Amino acid sequence: MACVMPFGLLLLLALSRGRLRILTNSVDANLLIPCGMLESVRVAKGRGCRATDCGGASSVKTQLGERCEALTPWKYPRSFGFAMDSSTSGGSYHTQPKWRKVAYGGMQPGFDDNHTDESFLEDIVMNANVVKRDILKVMLDSVSISEYLCIVTLVGLVWTYTLRSTLDENSLLFLDIGLLGSGFLILLFTEGSLSLSLLLHYILNISYFTTGLYVLAPIYQTLTRSISSDSIWALSVSLIILHLFLHDYSGSTVRAPGDVKNPSLTSCISLNASIVASVLIASRLPSRSHVFAIMLFSLQVFLFAPLVFYSIKKFSLHLHLLFSFCLVTITLVYVYFLHQLFFILLASLLIFVTIVCPYWLIRIQEFKFEINGPWDEAKLCFDIRD
């Protein structure tokens, strides 16, 4: 008796062995059957077979199974739509593209957008720009801060003694003249570019400045008449603290002749804060001459004193240290006579700035960790103004 083996059943039996996987439905059945098995399938599909010839349906099934067991992995073309199972192929037949480190170009096939490999950290540089500091040098640099703290403290002492009527207007005027003359003499000896003609030009400008200040003195005297003294003192102290925080301790807001570097914004704000504080204090004085003398003194100190001290420092470091020591000693003596609590606070502040802060900076420098690599932004290696 003839038996007919449907082709769909043979195909199902071949797929049940787990050897082949069909990815598309539009494919020739001949591609699924290897070598000699093709004839057996055609006989079963077309004209049938006898039990004595091929053993019936079970014989075809057994033959198909034996041949499928003996199959070796095939590598079909991609256009046929076949892929080998991972259990038989032992891995992918397609090579993974190599990752490239590119700045632009979109995502690379087979990799995530944030993918990196071992070569990403090959160009890393650690602590390339960290400067090793010496504690003695840091302490010498902090002397300039202590020096300016003493200058501002002396200005506050002059304001206090003037408001108490301990200093009259004549003493203030003589003090102004002495400070102005000594400042110009120091600049003349320490600055090589300062000529006599330039000095006369400065004196002429200062004469214009003092004349205008004397004319505006009555306006300054009555400027804050409707404001209480407590508010004036609170606002003045706040402005002086702002002045100290924003002051440029590395130089001077008033630049020396020939200096092309412009003052920073913070230093200009600091200077304006000190001038406003001087105006507020001067508005509490009783006479026009007091206002003129205290305003001239304050402007001389806040405008020209940093320039003079900076010139001394550039001229000689030893002279700068000697001058700073004398200034600190005089300031502490006057503050001690004014109030002992203020003396303790000022002495503690000077010790903290000159000794504790440099030591603190050196200690925390050990924990600084800086990394640089190809991910950093590009930096110009030349001056853009050139």
Image (cartoon, rainbow, N blue to C red):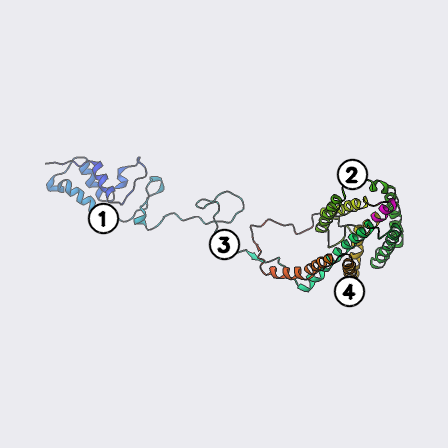
> Where is mark 3, residue-wise?
119
Residue 69: which disc?
1
Specify start and end residues of the magenta stretch as a single range. 286-294
The label nearer to you, 3 versus 1, is 3
Residue at x 33%, y 40% (from the top left corner): 81
The label nearer to you, 2 versus 3, is 2
> Where is mark 4, residue-wise?
318
Residue type (three-letter) at the residue carrying disc 1? Glu
Residue type (three-letter) at the residue carrying disc 2? Ser
Q: CA distance from mark 4 to mark 3?
A: 53 Å
Secondary element under disc 2, as helix, strand or loop, is loop
Residue at x 53%, y 44% (from the top left corner): 104
Q: Which mark sits nearer the N-terminus, 2 or 3?
A: 3
Query: Magenta: predominant secondary structure element?
Result: helix
Residue at x 22%, y 36% (from the top left corner): 8
Q: Is residue 174 left or right of residue 7?
A: right
Q: Is residue 386 left or right of residue 211?
A: left
* Residue 113 spot, x, y in % from top left: 48, 45
Secondary element under disc 3, as helix, strand or loop, is helix
Q: CA distance from mark 3 to mark 1?
A: 46 Å
Q: Which mark sits nearer the N-terminus, 2 or 1?
A: 1
Secondary element under disc 1, as helix, strand or loop, is helix
Specify few, some or many for label 3: CA neighbours under 10 Å numbering under 14, 14-19, or 20 or more. few
Q: Which quadrant of the figure has residue 181? A: bottom right
- Residue 137 or 22: which is nearer the viewer? 137
- Residue 271 or 97: which is nearer the viewer? 271
Residue type (three-letter) at the residue carrying disc 4? His
Q: Is residue 8 above or below residue 368?
A: above
Q: Which mark sits nearer the N-terminus, 4 or 1?
A: 1
> Where is mark 2, residue-wise?
226
- Label 4–label 3 contact, CB within 8 A: no
